[in-house]
């Protein structure tokens, strides 16, 4: 069943990305996936790696990840059961460093540096807002769209005014810009910067190698630079501090768990978005 008024292949792409985000965004899922990076673990070994989970929380999370096809349960004997990544789970891991790269450049600067794992969780929260994937897709492909026209595309079976709550949230998150009430909407620099992340999620969810992200019909094409316009929700941005070298799409992550769960050692960039990203 179509979820938008876009062509069927585009509608299916958006639905796949939305479903992929729904698999990994729930609390603790990314941490469990990262804890399983490496050889399969027994339940007790995994529980020791995610010791902050209370008794009874880990098992349903593992079951949900198994049902999603990201983790597999292997019963060697009645007393020897291990958990490890499926091929799909392994293929997803390289997307996570791309999320951190985006977050380092675009998320609001916190009072203190956040561990990379928290940057991933905060970023995924932004992307799983209701209708976010469809709205971002349309704004990326059409550049500027009125709220009424956006509603006809993104939620054709709903009252068109229902588009404004998710739009206002995306503006508050710093992913969408507008000059004000009644004016068109367009992607902010942060929203446009999500191209590699959403392109990789699209490739992964379609079962393609992540290298195909660069060929995505929308997210594979960087937005052309335009003359500055006085968008109300955008502020002039200071030059960011030096970032780590960009990670190549399709390569395996080079992190260790200690990198993800500890504070980064490099300085975070200057604040890029006023009010962008969740606060902690």
Image: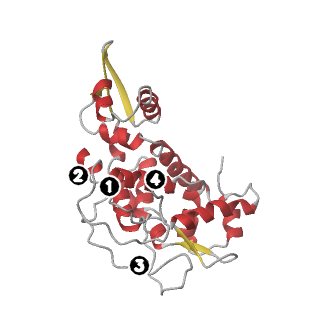
Mark sitting earlier along the chain (3/2): 3
Of mark 1 and mark 4, the one earlier in the sequence is: 1
Residue sitting at 72 percent across and 58 percent down? Answer: 156
Could you classify mark 4 by the number of other residues whose Cα lies within 10 Å: few (under 14), some (14-19), or many (20 or more)? many
Residue 167 is tagged as none
Local secondary structure at mark 2? loop
Q: Mark 3 or mark 1: name the one nearer the start of the chain.
A: 1
Q: CA distance from mark 3 to mark 4?
A: 23 Å
Q: Are marks 1 and 2 in contact (CB under 8 Å)?
A: yes
Crowdedness near tag 1: few (<14), some (14–19) or many (≥20) residues, C-alpha within 10 Å: many
- Between 226 and 118, the one lying in front of the other is 118
Residue reaching furthest to the right? 159
- The answer to whether the residues at label 3 and label 2 have Cβ atoms under 8 Å apart is no
The dot on residue 254 is 2
Q: Nearer the viewer, residue 250 or 64?
A: 64
- Residue 125 location (% of width, % of height): 49, 53
In depth, the one of 276 and 13 nearer the eye is 276
Report the Cα–Cα distance between label 1 and label 4: 12 Å
Q: Please, what secondary structure does the residue beneath circle 4 have?
A: helix
Disc nearer the start of the sequence (2/4): 4
Note whether residue 273 is visible. yes
Q: Mark 3 vs mark 4: give the one in front.
A: 3
Q: Which residue lies under the disc numbered 1?
A: 97
Residue density around tag 3, few if under 14, some if 14–19, many if 20 or more, within 10 Å: few
The numbered disc on residue 237 is: 3
Separation of residues labelled 2 and 4 (CA atoms): 20 Å
Location of mark 4 (residue): 124
Give x and y (percent) for residue 153.
67, 62
Q: Are marks 2 and 4 in contact (CB under 8 Å)?
A: no
Quadrant position of the C terminus in the picture? bottom left
Residue at (37, 46) in percent of width and height: 92
Q: CA distance from mark 3 to mark 2?
A: 30 Å
């Amino acid at each position: 069943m179509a979820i938008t008024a876009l062509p069927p292949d585009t509608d299916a792409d958006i639905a796949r990305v939305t479903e992929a985000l729904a698999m990994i965004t729930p609390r603790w899922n990314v941490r469990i996936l990262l804890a399983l990076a490496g050889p399969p673990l027994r339940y007790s070994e995994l529980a020791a790696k995610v010791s902050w989970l209370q008794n009874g929380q880990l098992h349903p999370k593992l079951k949900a990840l198994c049902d999603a096809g990201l983790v597999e349960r292997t019963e060697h004997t009645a007393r020897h059961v291990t958990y490890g990544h499926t091929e799909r789970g392994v293929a997803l891991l390289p997307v996570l460093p791309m999320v951190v790269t985006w977050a380092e450049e675009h998320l609001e600067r916190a009072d203190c540096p956040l561990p990379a794992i928290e940057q991933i969780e905060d970023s995924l929260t932004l992307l799983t807002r209701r209708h976010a994937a469809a709205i971002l897709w349309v704004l990326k492909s059409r550049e500027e769209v009125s709220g009424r026209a956006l509603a006809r595309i993104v939620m054709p079976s709903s009252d068109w005014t229902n588009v404004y709550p998710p739009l206002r949230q995306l503006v508050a998150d710093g992913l969408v810009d507008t000059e004000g009430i009644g004016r068109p909407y367009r992607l902010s620099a942060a929203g446009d910067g999500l191209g590699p992340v959403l392109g990789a999620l699209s490739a992964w969810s379609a079962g393609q190698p992540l290298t195909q992200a660069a060929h995505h019909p929308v997210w594979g094409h960087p937005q052309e630079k335009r003359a500055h316009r006085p968008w109300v929700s955008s502020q002039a941005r200071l030059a960011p501090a030096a970032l780590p070298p960009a990670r190549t799409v399709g390569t395996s992550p080079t992190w260790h768990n200690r990198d993800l769960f500890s504070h980064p050692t490099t300085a975070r960039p200057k604040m890029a978005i006023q009010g962008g990203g969740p606060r902690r």
